[in-house]
Structures are given as structure tokens and as C-alpha cells.
């Protein structure tokens, strides 16, 4: 879990009565650079995906179908993957709707 500087400062000050509503957490995975990032930092990527409400693979229009299936297979630990492409505006609309619905659930 990522801890912001503000949250760290509040914790140091001992302000227990302050409540934070972080909202939905989205992990954004860059499709074209996935192989390099996975090779260099698999634990970091897994850690970011573990508690995410949604995992989004971006720029999928720049990745061929075979590589995209490889990415999805590698990230099978995340059941909440959404593909984001500039060629299909419906994926952006779908992400926006999911964020709104997740935010309303909290």
C-alpha cells in the first residue's frame, strides 16, 4: 500500500481522530513497456496490483494480440483487469463508470 506524505505526517502527530477516504485505487500498467517492467520489478508490480480495486493495462493499441495475451496471462493474479486503448473510447467510458460505481460503494 502506498502511504502519502500527508498520511505519514498525521500518523507521526498521533491524530487518531482524522479519517481518510482514499477512494478506489487503480494500478495502471503500461502495455508497451510491460515486459521490461515485469523483468525489472515483478514484486513491485504485484504489490501494486494486490490491493488495487482495478488494474488497467494502458496503450493496448500499441501491443499486438499475442503480447497482450502474454501480459494478461502473467497478470492472472488480478481478476479485475481492464484494457485501455485510444482506439476504443468505450474502454475509457467503461473505466470512468467503474470508478464512479466504486466510489459510490465506499
Image: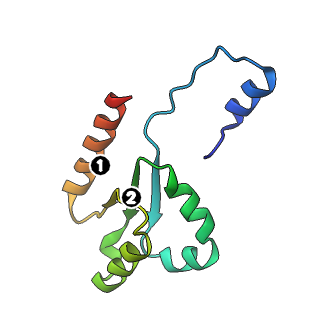
Residue 33 visible at all: no
Crowdedness near tag 2: few (<14), some (14–19) or many (≥20) residues, C-alpha within 10 Å: many
Quadrant in which the C terminus appears: top left
Percent position of residue 8, x then y: 73, 33
- Helix, strand, or loop for circle 1? helix
For the residue pair 62 and 27, the one nearer the viewer reads as 27
Q: Looking at the image, is 70 positioned above or below residue 96?
A: below
Which quadrant of the figure has residue 62? bottom left
- Please tell me which of labels 2 and 1 falls first in the chain: 2
Q: CA distance from mark 2 to mark 1?
A: 9 Å
For the residue pair 28 and 79, the one nearer the viewer reads as 79
Which quadrant of the figure has residue 55? bottom left
Q: Residue at x 41, y 47 (%)?
A: 53
Q: Residue at x 58, y 58 (%)?
A: 47
Name of the residue lying farthest toward the right: 12
Total marks in image = 2
Crowdedness near tag 1: few (<14), some (14–19) or many (≥20) residues, C-alpha within 10 Å: some
- Helix, strand, or loop for circle 2? strand
Percent position of residue 66, x then y: 31, 85
| Disc 1: which residue | 95
Percent position of residue 86, x then y: 28, 63
| Disc 2: which residue | 56
Q: Are marks 2 and 1 in contact (CB under 8 Å)?
A: yes
Q: Looking at the image, is 11 positioned above or below residue 1?
A: above
Q: Residue at x 38, y 58 (%)?
A: 56
Q: Looking at the image, is 78 positioned above or below residue 25?
A: below
For the residue pair 99 and 73, the one nearer the viewer reads as 73
Q: Is residue 49 left or right of residue 101?
A: right
Amino acid at each position: 500500500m502506498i502511504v502519502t506524505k500527508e498520511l505519514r505526517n498525521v500518523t507521526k502527530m498521533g491524530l487518531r481522530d482524522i479519517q481518510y477516504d482514499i477512494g478506489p485505487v487503480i494500478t495502471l500498467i503500461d502495455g508497451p513497456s510491460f515486459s521490461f517492467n515485469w523483468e525489472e520489478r515483478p514484486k513491485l508490480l504485484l504489490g501494486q496490483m494486490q490491493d488495487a480495486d482495478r488494474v488497467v493495462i494502458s496503450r493496448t493499441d500499441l501491443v499486438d494480440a499475442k503480447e497482450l495475451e502474454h501480459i494478461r496471462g502473467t497478470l492472472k493474479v488480478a481478476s479485475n483487469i481492464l484494457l485501455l486503448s485510444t482506439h476504443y473510447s468505450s474502454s475509457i467510458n467503461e473505466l470512468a463508470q467503474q470508478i464512479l460505481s466504486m466510489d459510490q460503494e465506499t
